[in-house]
Amino acid sequence: MTDPIDHDLARLSRGMPPAALADMEQRVAATIAAAPVPVGTLSVRGMALAAAVAMVLGLAGGGVMAGRSEARERPGAAVVALGGGLAPSTLLLGR
């Protein structure tokens, strides 16, 4: 019993590809080469503005997370884990 996909793939492999596909790679390369290249689309001012916006968003997001009560409280489980001597951070400290 053959799979319908296997049957279709076998049928496609027996056939010849269409003649229009023979020079398709050269036509695509010629079209890309003929396309105008945009010059100066990324300005220094625009990049600086994007970097400044990213910094402001990062600082605001960090400030919101630091202001939450979950971030200010130390969980009790972390203190117990550090005392066990199995945490990688304690291994790096030589404990």
Image (spheres, rainbow, N blue to C red):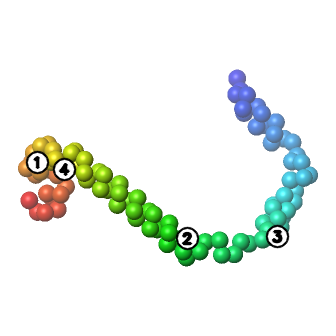
| Disc number placed over residue 72 in the picture, else none | 4
Please rate how many residues cluster around mark 3, counting C-alpha atoms within 10 Å: few if below 14, some from 14 to 19, many from 20: few
Label 3 or label 1, whichever comes before in sequence order: 3
Secondary structure category for the residue under label 3: helix
Name the residue at 89% across, 48% down.
Answer: 18
Q: In which quarter of the image is the N terminus?
A: top right
Label 4 or label 2, whichever comes before in sequence order: 2
Residue for badge 2: 46
* Residue at the top extreme of this rendering: 1
Please rate how many residues cluster around mark 4, counting C-alpha atoms within 10 Å: few if below 14, some from 14 to 19, many from 20: few
Label 2 or label 1, whichever comes before in sequence order: 2
Name the residue at 29% across, 51% down.
Answer: 65
| Disc number placed over residue 10 in the picture, else none | none
Secondary structure category for the residue under label 4: helix
Q: Looking at the picture, which amino acid does disc 4 mark?
A: Arg
Residue for badge 1: 79
Q: How far apart are marks 2 and 1 (CA)?
A: 47 Å
Name the residue at 15% across, 58% down.
Answer: 91
Q: Distance between the residues labelled 4 and 3?
A: 59 Å
Q: In which quarter of the image is residue 77?
A: top left
* Residue at the right extreme of this rendering: 19
Label 4 or label 1, whichever comes before in sequence order: 4
Q: How far apart are marks 3 and 2 (CA)?
A: 28 Å
Q: Looking at the picture, which amino acid does disc 3 mark?
A: Ala
Residue for badge 3: 34
**Does 7 sit above or below residue 43?**
above
Secondary structure category for the residue under label 1: helix
Nearer the camera: disc 4 or disc 1:
4
Q: In which quarter of the image is residue 7?
A: top right
